[in-house]
Image (spheres, helix red, strand yellow):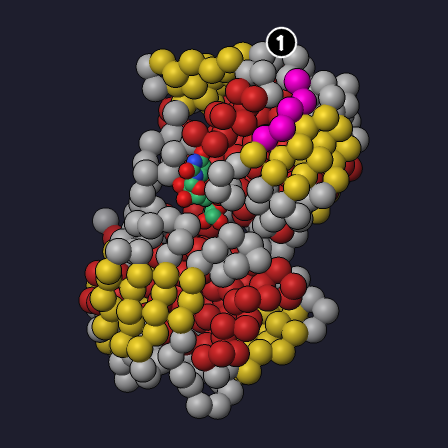
């Protein structure tokens, strides 16, 4: 298990390029199961969740070649319809193959995802949506066994906005007989990206990006070439890294509109943020102030950047508040930030943060992907040395974050397993 070593205090400066979006890539890769043939998917980040999805596609029968952020996928003659426990336990998003397998093969056997560091994370919305589309579902021996003759268009209403279940319902409904209407659908850019990909494969989807998505089912789809949108969560992470060290950082290959509220919160704190067409620049700006943030579905503040902002606000004088409205248990990282000297109090789904003048380096342990990134950026601003263990969490969602930060001037290195033992 690799570790990351940071000697804090270096001001970041320079230009860095964001990768393609992990959370758009995972459903797009699963959606390739919907049609036989050859695909070329570009702007794919080389990170471990994507590699897990590739393993899953191979297990199902796809041929996949991954070179230089491009994936060539061939899906001819796929017979398998199972996502095994071994893969699902390492990545919940494996559940994304459920909709496409049902749409294409009429059956799927997918290991039931367990809990995770963010809490219980049920999949009832996924299963209810598929049930409405006509799927029979049985849960036995830890597996979801699902079957359908032909999916039938229907009306789906999600009680709460859900990215994953919206994606699964979309990927099933494109091949259903007749019309499907998804109400209270997720509006995240990753859903829009998936719908754009499906439409390029011949699907008839309208309204993506809004709360009502209308899908006219088609008999079959065809493969298509596609390029993923940039990763707005990585973009936010890199901007917070710049902010944390009060440096000037330019992030390229991004879509500033995808990060609207995040940029406004950085401005509210007192940082200067300038957008160009596909880049964002953060500069130290003037006087800083504590702020309040509430996470919400898009276009609200993304829960995935909540731990990053907790790290940043730990260094801003005054009392900041963060309300976590998506995953109520997403505060496992607090005790680790406290080890770095952060003054954070938890009450229910809310934390209050009293900014301290300086964080101080210490050994810490990453509990999940975004918390790992929060610890790395906190370490950049801490006095002395911080060693972050369980870096595999970081690697699930970031392509060598430490190399990008080092290119901006951070004193950061990865200690590889061989060097440790
Ligand atoms: C996706 C993202 C994750 C992000 C989250 C919210 C991927 C791979 N992951 O996760 O990074 O933090 O969106 O933006 O894209 N819920 C249920 N039942 C369900 C499904 C969800 O109760 O069947 C609840 C969840 O527990 C959570 C809320 O709905 O409280 C939203 O979850 P959802 O949007 O589905 O998150 P994911 O798709 O799992």
Q: Residue at x 54, y 47 (%)?
A: 22
Image location of residue 316, percent across then percent down? 35, 80
Residue 404 lies left or right of residue 372; in this view the side is right
Position above or below: 143 against 268: above
Image location of residue 117, percent across then percent down? 31, 45
Q: Residues within 10 Å of mark 1 (few under 14, many from 20)?
A: few
Q: Nearer the viewer, residue 188 or 79?
A: 188
Number of labels in the image equals 1
Position above or below: 98 against 81: below
Q: Residue at x 55, y 66 (%)?
A: 261
| Magenta region | 152-156
Main SS, magenta residues:
loop
Q: Is residue 58 visible?
A: no
For disc 1, does the CB lie below 8 Å from ligand 1? Answer: no
**Secondary structure category for the residue under label 1:** loop
Residue furthest top in the image: 149
Image location of residue 81, percent across then percent down? 54, 16
Q: Residue at x 37, y 61 (%)?
A: 323
Residue 250 lies left or right of residue 308; in this view the side is right
Q: Nearer the viewer, residue 32 or 73?
A: 32
Position above or below: 240 against 56: below
Q: Is residue 156 visible?
A: yes
Residue furthest bottom in the image: 286
Position above or below: 108 against 408: above
Q: Residue at x 45, y 79 (%)?
A: 269
269 falls in the magenta region: no
Image location of residue 379, percent across then percent down? 32, 70
Residue position marked by numbered label 1 in the rendering:
149
């Amino acid at each position: 298990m690799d570790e990351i070593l940071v000697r804090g205090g270096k001001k970041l400066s320079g230009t860095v390029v964001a990768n393609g979006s992990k959370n758009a890539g995972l459903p797009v890769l699963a959606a390739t199961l919907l049609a036989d043939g050859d695909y070329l998917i570009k702007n794919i980040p080389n990170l471990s969740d994507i590699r897990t999805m590739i393993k899953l596609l191979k297990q199902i029968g796809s041929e996949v070649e991954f070179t230089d952020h491009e994936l060539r996928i061939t899906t001819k003659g796929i017979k398998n319809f199972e996502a095994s426990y071994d893969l699902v336990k390492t990545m919940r998003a494996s559940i994304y193959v459920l909709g496409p397998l049902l749409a294409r093969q009429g059956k799927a056997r997918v290991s039931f995802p367990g809990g995770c560091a963010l809490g219980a994370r049920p999949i009832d919305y996924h299963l209810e949506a598929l049930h409405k589309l006509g799927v029979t579902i049985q849960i036995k021996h830890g597996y979801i066994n699902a079957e359908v003759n032909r999916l039938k268009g229907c009306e789906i209403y999600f009680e709460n906005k859900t990215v994953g279940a919206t994606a699964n319902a979309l990927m099933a409904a494109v091949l259903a007989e007749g019309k499907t209407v998804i109400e209270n659908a997720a509006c995240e850019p990753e859903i829009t990206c998936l719908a754009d990909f499906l439409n390029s494969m011949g699907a008839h989807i309208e309204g993506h990006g809004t709360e009502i998505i209308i899908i006219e089912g088609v008999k079959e789809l065809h493969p298509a070439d596609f390029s993923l949108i940039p990763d707005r969560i990585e973009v936010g992470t890199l901007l917070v890294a710049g902010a944390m060290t009060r440096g000037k950082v330019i992030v390229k290959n991004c879509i500033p509109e995808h990060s609207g509220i995040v940029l406004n919160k950085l401005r509210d704190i007192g940082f200067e943020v300038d957008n160009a067409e596909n880049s964002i620049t953060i500069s130290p700006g003037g006087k800083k102030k504590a702020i309040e943030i509430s996470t919400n579905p898009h276009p609200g503040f993304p829960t995935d950047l909540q731990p990053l902002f907790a790290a940043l606000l730990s260094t801003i004088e005054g009392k900041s508040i963060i309300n976590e409205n998506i995953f109520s248990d997403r505060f496992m990282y607090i005790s680790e930030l406290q080890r770095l000297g952060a003054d954070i109090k938890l009450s229910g789904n809310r934390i209050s943060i009293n900014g301290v003048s300086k964080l101080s380096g210490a050994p810490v342990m990453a509990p999940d992907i975004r918390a790992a990134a929060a610890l790395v950026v906190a370490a950049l601003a801490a006095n002395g040395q911080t060693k972050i263990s369980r870096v595999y969490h970081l690697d699930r969602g970031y392509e060598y974050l430490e190399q990008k930060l080092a290119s901006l001037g951070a004193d950061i290195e990865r200690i590889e397993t061989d060097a440790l033992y």
